[in-house]
Structure formats: C-alpha cells, structure tokens
Amino acid sequence: SEYIPSYLANLVPIQRNKNIEKQIQLTVVATSERTLDVILKAPKMTLAQLGVSLPCRLPIESMAELSPLDDNMANKIHSLFAESISAQCSMDKDTLTTFNNRRFKNEMPLSCYQVLAQDSTSELKFIVLLKKDQSSEQNHINVKISHIDVDLYREASELKLKVNGMEIPRSNLPYQDPTGF
C-alpha cells in the first residue's frame, strides 16, 4: 500500500475497519454507462474515487451475459469495450452520418466551421471541424489535437495536408510530429 501508482493517486482515503492482511482488493462498479466507482482496499488503508467519468459509454447491456467464472474473461471484456468504442462518422455529399448511425442532410453555410467530433471530457483533448470552402465549395477538415493543428483539403483535385500551417508532401507520410506527441 506504500507504492500506489500515479494513476491511482486521485483515490481518496476512507476510514474503515482494518482490512485483511496480505491482501489487496480492487473493486470497480459501473454506476452508469458513463461513470465508475473505484475502491482499493490494502492492508493499511482503503482508497476510493466515486463517480469517475469515462470518455466513452460502457456496453453494460452486453456485459450482463458475462459470468465471473467465464474462461478468458479479460479477452471477452476487452472485445466488448473495443466494439463499444469503435465508431465512424462520415460525410457523403450533403449527408452526414454520425457515430451512432444517425443521418442528417447537412446544409452548411460557406466558410463556417461545424463540429464533427470532439473529446467529451472537460479537457477537450481533440476536436474535428468541417467547413465548406467559399471559393471551391470543397469540404475542408481541421483537426486540433493538443498543440497540433491539421488541415485536410482538396486543391486541383489533389488531397493536401497541412500540419501547423506547413504543407506535408505525400512522400513524407505517415507524418511524425517532431515533438514526439
């Protein structure tokens, strides 16, 4: 209990009865599709963090079929999470298909950005924007991740990529940010 990893540092100590010696117990409870309660019991202390927000929804309805005695439990849970967080949005002409497969006819004014996707946490780690260029009426995609600003657009029927305002030739793809981000 003296060597708590940094990712558990936000857990708050709780006064409880003395826990079982030589045993560590981690309990994680899904209180909703988007929140968890985490309780860590070690011989000398009990730590808890309630209402931990998740960046994606949990596939609770799919997990109801699982039993703690299932073989390969970790692989089954990993597969369920992978399925629940994999999603794709797309735009075909003027039809926008969202991550949850809803379709919208998109009438976008020229040179105005629309948010296609963004981080659902308060930190806003990424955002994907779309606008229709005024001169060419082509779609222009802008992705902001931390200090990186990526622009994707067509020019003379060729796809162009700019990172922080600098054009990246196709021969330099895949691109690796020099800061290592």
Image (cartoon, grey):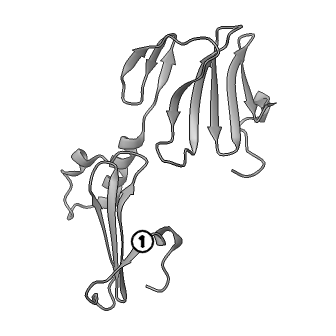
For residue 106, side relative to residue 24 (left or right) = right
Coordinates of residue 98 in the picture (x, y in percent): 42, 26
The residue at 65%/45% (across/down) is 146
Q: Quick one: label 1, few (<14), some, or many (20+) residues within 10 Å?
A: some
Specify whether 66 is left or right of 178: left
**Residue 72 seen:** no
Which residue lies at the image location 49% right of the left edge and 23% below the top edge?
90
- Rendered position, 130 above or below 46: above
Count of marks, rendered view: 1
Q: Is residue 154 above or below residue 117?
A: above
The answer to which of 46 and 141 lies nearer the viewer is 46
Q: Amino acid at mark 1?
A: Leu
Position of the N terminus, as image quadrant, is bottom left
Q: Is residue 9 left or right of residue 179?
A: left
Residue lying at 63% horizontally and 33% vertically, measured from the top left = 143
Q: Secondary structure at mark 1?
A: loop
Q: Nearer the viewer, residue 33 or 171?
A: 33
Quarter location, residue 85: top left
Q: Tell me the residue at 73%/39% (across/down).
A: 175
Q: Where does residue 178 sit, x and y in percent of width and height? A: 78, 48
Q: Quadrant of residue 152?
A: top right
Residue 41 shows up from this direction: yes
Question: Where residue 41 sits in the image (x, y, percent)?
Answer: 33, 79
Reading the image, the residue beneath label 1 is 11
